[in-house]
Amino acid sequence: MQWIGKSWKGRWLCLMLVLLLCPFIIAQKIGDPYKILGIHRRASLSEIRKAYRQLAKEWHPDKNEDPNAESRFVEIKQAYELLSDTERRQAYDLYGITNEDDHMYKQRHDYSQYARFSNDPFDFFSAHFRTQDQDITLFHKLSVTTRHFENNILEKSVHTPALVLFYTDWCFDCVRSASSWRKLVEALQPLGVTLATVHAGHEASLARRIGVHGVPCLTFVLDKQIYIYKESLASLPKVLEYIRWKFPYKMIQNLDDSNANAFLNDFEDNKVKALIFEERQVIRLRYLITAFHYRDWVSFAFVDISSRDTQNLTARYKVQRSMDTMVLLKEDSPEPVATVSTTEIPTQTLTQLIEANQMLTLPRLSSQSVLDAVCPVEWRAARRRVCCVLLDGPGIDISSLEHRIVVIWRREASRVQFEWLNETWPTCQHCSDDMEETPEYHERLNETKRALEQLVKRLLKPNEVVAYEAHVQELLDEAAKSAIWRAFLKLAEWSERAILALRTQHAISLISVVATVALVLAVGYLMAYLIRVEEESIQRQKQERRHQNGSKPSEPQPEMRLHELRAEKYNGLVRLQKPGCRTIVLLVDMQSRVQLLSKFHKIVWPYRKNKTLVFAYLCVERGVEWFRRVLELSLGGASLRVNGRNCVGTVLALNPHRKYFCIYHAKHPECAKPHKRMSRMTRSLGGGALDPEAGAFIGFTTEPESDEEPYEPPVLLQENLLDGLENWLDRLFEGSTHRYYVNYWPDMTTK
């Protein structure tokens, strides 16, 4: 190797080998790529390329004799590759993912296809399905049941977020997404996120209840809420951005020199203060997840070291710019109780540090959860745990300005045993610090401490009996908000989120589409308005002309037309009628036409607005043959002889769609025995009627029975033929009239 390195060809060969082997070597941490290239975080792509060219020429191994030139050149190249890729640059800016984490979001090339083939022609297919089985195995390892999902994942999501992937066995999309799922597991599991899979076929009820319509389906469980991710799993930054968006809004306050004192001096929320210092504009996801887990005990704030507005705050806690730092503060001292500083603070270190300092020095019993954490329940006397509580507030008698102390032992959640301390804790609310440092104050304080220690030691003895016992209720949460206030905060949160979302490129595209649709609707509304204004103007002009001519505007009168039933209109009035429509037909001749039509028009006038009724008349001189054919069809084909004069005054109610009709005539009213009525109508239908001036009702022709008494119809005048039509129409619409069915409607010929 030394001989090769002596010539320029050897150096180039070494350099090419280094560059080719870089993707297969576990890269070391390159640090901040912006500092490596000497550019600012908002540098454009052209500025990045310019800086890369200059540094590449400067640190090229052929031009620089520095022994670290090769490693420096590779570092510059890696920084350029990271920042020149838009997706990788965004991942670094948001989550701090550098080249050493490249495997988490960029797929490795599969070289299995270049493997040496054997003589077995099915080797390729078997290898392909072996790869699929290996991917599906990852899903099976993390698979959970419905009971585990509901009792563990969903319940613990109040503090621990979870990603759950729904899959099935024979799902090629699931196989393709296995590599993306593996990246999510490697990226989020170390941060404290629960990752699990659910077989959608085995747990079908859970999939339906959540709303899973296809596999693979990624769901995010947070605070007992289930959110479905509807995009592809191929892009890790998009998934992480979706997760970040679902966390409570403003859970972490942005801190600078202007609002630092207000945050650090406010311990009314009864929480420890935690400051996260980073040289970036957005907090890392690992710290966001930790803040969500301890949000009930710790108030988190984020400080951007790179901002000019945070210089005083950074100098106050001596934070190094190249390190991530977390500072924990309590109420009894302005100095931090704990500090950790490293390049990326591991989640385990964060958890250990916060667990050891998650309570204030003197926490206030502000809720039941605080009471359970400070003073847990222990029913066994040998392992009893006692708590010393200093009573304070407007409900306590503090006329002597000295507070009482009570020592309690929680045997059950609703039952406590307690004893009062005879001595009181000395305080002076209106005295200065110098007055409290008097010998008398120290003497009283020491006496109270000794008395408290003696009381606690005595109560910790297993056989010691506590003096008092009481039943207590659950403590109210001081931080609980009303439903109206929660709704208002939710509305304000979504309003601010919407304003922030409007700044993204996707939101701008969406706004342009919405604006285009709104413009089209506005133009359509404007055109409709102009047309309406034009129509109103024309109506006003017509009214003005009528007023000038002295004529009053006539009110529109409803019309009712009587159609003549003949061959030209037969299809429209009968055969092609819509379902539910009926045609009312009056049979007249030329002699009775005027008188009967006038009375018929007056009787049916109240039904003029009924759109299912059509009124018509039939001249027997033209249509008696059609009428005879209808009667024959209703009788099953029996032959009839019809006298047209005897048919005058008959009213037919035709239902063309159902193929039946009802008949009215005053001379033959309907009775309880329709067959007897038909017989009478048949006899009156013969060649000569007893009353030729009055129309006889047309019935069905049948031979009268031998034992039937002869029936003589009453004599009626022409003007009395329609007297009972009004009552018959009422029965017709009630459905109480007899119906006569036909197989089809016969043709009407033109004479």
Image (cartoon, rainbow, N blue to C red):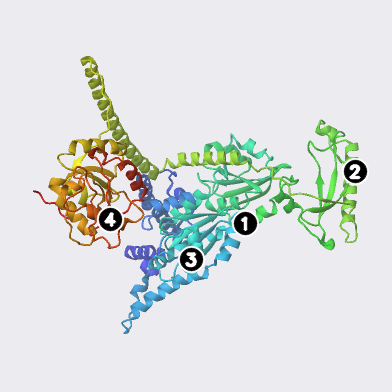
| Tag 1 residue | 349
* Drawn side of residue 351 relative to residue 215, left or right: right
Circles 4 and 3: CB distance less than 8 Å? Answer: no
Per the model, the C-alpha gap separating discs 1 and 4 is: 117 Å
Circle 2 is placed at which residue position? 423
Of marks 1 and 4, the one in the foreground: 4
Q: Nearer the viewer, mark 4 or mark 2?
A: 4
* Residue placed most toward the observer, 340 or 30: 340
Numbered disc in front, either 4 or 3: 4
Q: Nearer the viewer, residue 37 or 386?
A: 386
Disc 2 from disc 3: Cα separation: 65 Å
Q: Secondary structure at mark 2?
A: loop
Element type at mark 3: helix
**433 to the left or right of 47:** right
The quarter of the image holding the N terminus is bottom left
Mark 2 or mark 3: name the one nearer the start of the chain: 3
Q: Give the numbered dot on residue 710.
A: 4
Q: In the figure, 142 relative to 709: above or below?
A: below
Distance from the alpha carbon under mark 4 to that under mark 2? 127 Å
Element at label 1? helix
Q: Quadrant of residue 72?
A: bottom left
- The residue lying at 42 percent from left, 66 percent from top is 174
Q: Are marks 1 and 2 in contact (CB under 8 Å)?
A: no
